[in-house]
Amino acid sequence: MEYQEQKFNIPVLNGISAKNIEEHLKLYSGYVKNTNLILKKIPEYEGYAKEDTFAPYVTGELHRRFAFEFNGMRNHEYYFSSLEDGAANLSEDSELKKAIESEWGSFDAWLARFKTIAMTRGIGWAVLYYDTKMKKLLNAWVDEQHLGQLNGAQPILMIDMWEHAFVYDYATSEKKKYVEAFFENLNWSKIEGNFAKAI
């Protein structure tokens, strides 16, 4: 069974252009295709192992690349789904808001900290996780797509901080404007849904 490219109901956004979303979705499509392609190629190269001493090295590289492509696919699914169906505020009595306030004192304190993480130099993702073992929320930075993912923790919110996420709208020196635009368009009901599934 192959992984399927998801379709997202993303309306007109404030500060993030339709052109940027269109091009960004093409990149997501590539991650889905490459995930499926690698899964097909691994058994093929494993079959060459007895005949070609180089084949195991190719298989090893395919496994390494798989983590990049698979996480690229999944990360973007969290990202795009959080922009679906129009912006919606986080309800005052939501369990997620209560958990954020319990962990960081206030929603605004968490948000300021998370936006600071998003401004980390380099390419990657700022992620709000839920650690299912310790029953607590965690912020983290993930390099590229896959380096630094927290094992056993469920992503609740992810913001893509690769330049491709905002290059049609903002210069790299203006990525803070993109971060603000992302939160302006965020559908918090989707994020609450992620949290409800994680707990």
Image: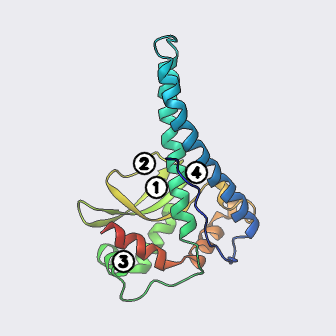
Q: Which residue is mark 3?
A: 96
The residue singled out by tag 1 in the image is: 141
Which mark's residue is nearer the viewer, 4 or 3? 3
Binning the other alpha carbons within 10 Å of mark 4 as few (below 14), some (14 to 19) or many (20 upward) gives: some
Picture colour scheme: rainbow
Residue 123 is marked as: 4
The type of residue carrying mark 4 is: Ile
Q: CA distance from mark 4 to mark 3?
A: 27 Å
Residue drawn at x 65%, y 70% as measured from the top left: 177
Of callouts 3 and 2, the N-terminal one: 3
Closer to the eye: label 3 or 2: 3
Could you give the CA–CA distance between mark 1 and mark 4, rounded to whole angstroms? 10 Å
Query: From mark 2 to mark 1, how far is it between C-alphas?
Result: 7 Å
Q: Identify the residue under disc 2.
A: 148
Residue 119 visible to the viewer: no
Q: Amino acid at mark 1?
A: Trp
Query: Which three-letter amino acid code belongs to the residue tagged 2?
Result: Gly
Secondary structure of residue under mark 1? strand
Q: Are marks 1 and 4 in contact (CB under 8 Å)?
A: no
Q: Earlier in the sequence, mark 1 or mark 3?
A: 3
Q: Who is closer to the viewer here, 96 or 107?
A: 96
Alpha-carbon span between mark 1 and mark 3:
20 Å
Is 105 above or below relative to 55?
below
Residue at figure coordinates x 27%, y 62% from the top left: 132
Image coordinates of residue 134 in percent, x first then y, are 23, 62
Instruction: Say which residue appears at 25% left-offset and 66% top-offset.
Output: 135
Q: Residues within 10 Å of mark 2 (few under 14, many from 20)?
A: few
